[in-house]
Image (tube, rainbow, N blue to C red):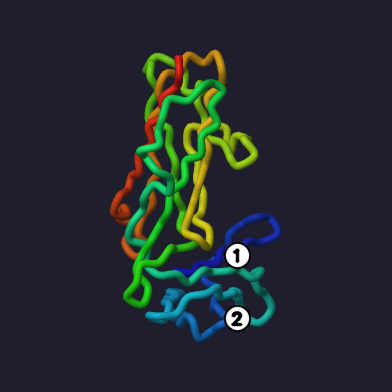
Amino acid sequence: PLRIQAFTRDSQEVTGLSVFFLPTTLPSLVKIDSATGFVVANDTATGTVQIVGRIGERLQTSVVSLLVVPEPTTIARADDPAGDVPLALPVLKDLPVTVTGTYKGASATITGIIVRYRIDSLVPATLPSGSAILVNDSALPLRPDSTVAVDTTSAAGTAMRKLLVVAGSGVQRVYVSASARRLHDAKPLAGSPVRFVVDIKQ
């Protein structure tokens, strides 16, 4: 469903307005129900649709890009679990996953899928949670609580965050999970959650 919220200059929400949505590019990819605001993609179409919302004849939203992709079905590690070996501190380890689905009868990587990462636990369990955090490609924390993070799959269907364990932290092992959900019913993808176990050399 597509929704618009309108506000006055005093930040008060305005209700009861007539709203409609318009695809400004590739309108053949989708159908938008003017009564409910639901956008439905054609069965075999993929691409990026740009949509604006209008209220009456004078107000219009900025353009929003909506990815039209096949339904994702599976998430898996994009590296080789057999290659997991204890790592020396300081640790900055990649945690890549790939999301796939079926498109025109064949397996395909799926772009635009949100993948949620979480540090599930540390060994020893008594260590403070900040002893290991999730960071972006530049090794920067992503949010105040950096034990959780999100990434969106690329055109290659991959998402990745990095695990940072600092020297002197006392961490011996880190358990990390990555999960994603189906689009049409929000149920977990097959293979979700993906598990990473990172051992630290002592």
**Relative to residue 170, is residue 58 drawn left or right?**
right
Q: Which mark is residue 169?
A: none
Q: Does the image show residue 145? A: no
- Give the position of the N terminus as an image quadrant: bottom left
How many labels, in total?
2
For disc 1, the marked residue is 6
**Relative to residue 191, is residue 147 drawn left or right?**
right
**Relative to residue 147, is residue 73 drawn left or right?**
left
**How busy is the neighbourhood of tag 2: few (under 14 within 10 Å), some, or many (20 plus)?**
few
What residue lies at 40% left-to-right and 67% top-to-bottom?
Answer: 108
Q: Does label 2 or label 1 sit earlier along the sequence?
A: 1
Kind of residue sitting beneath label 1: Ala
What residue lies at 65% left-to-right and 55% top-to-bottom?
Answer: 11
- Name the foreground residue: 109 vs 122: 109
Q: Position of residue 129 (x, y in %)?
A: 47, 23
For disc 2, the marked residue is 25
Q: Position of residue 65 (x, y in %)?
A: 58, 69
- Direction front: furthest residue: 83
Kind of residue sitting beneath label 2: Thr
Secondary structure beneath disc 2? loop
Q: From this view, report whether residue 47 is shown above or below residue 152.
A: below
Q: CA distance from mark 2 to mark 1?
A: 24 Å
What residue lies at 50% left-to-right and 25% top-to-bottom?
Answer: 132
- Direction bottom: furthest residue: 28
Q: From this view, report whether residue 72 is shown above or below residue 49.
A: above
Q: From this view, report whether residue 180 is shown above or below residue 197.
A: below
Q: From this view, report whether residue 159 is shown above or below residue 59.
A: above
Secondary structure beneath disc 1? strand
Q: Position of residue 28 (x, y in %)?
A: 50, 86
**How busy is the neighbourhood of tag 1: few (under 14 within 10 Å), some, or many (20 plus)?**
few
Corner quadrant of residue 19: bottom right
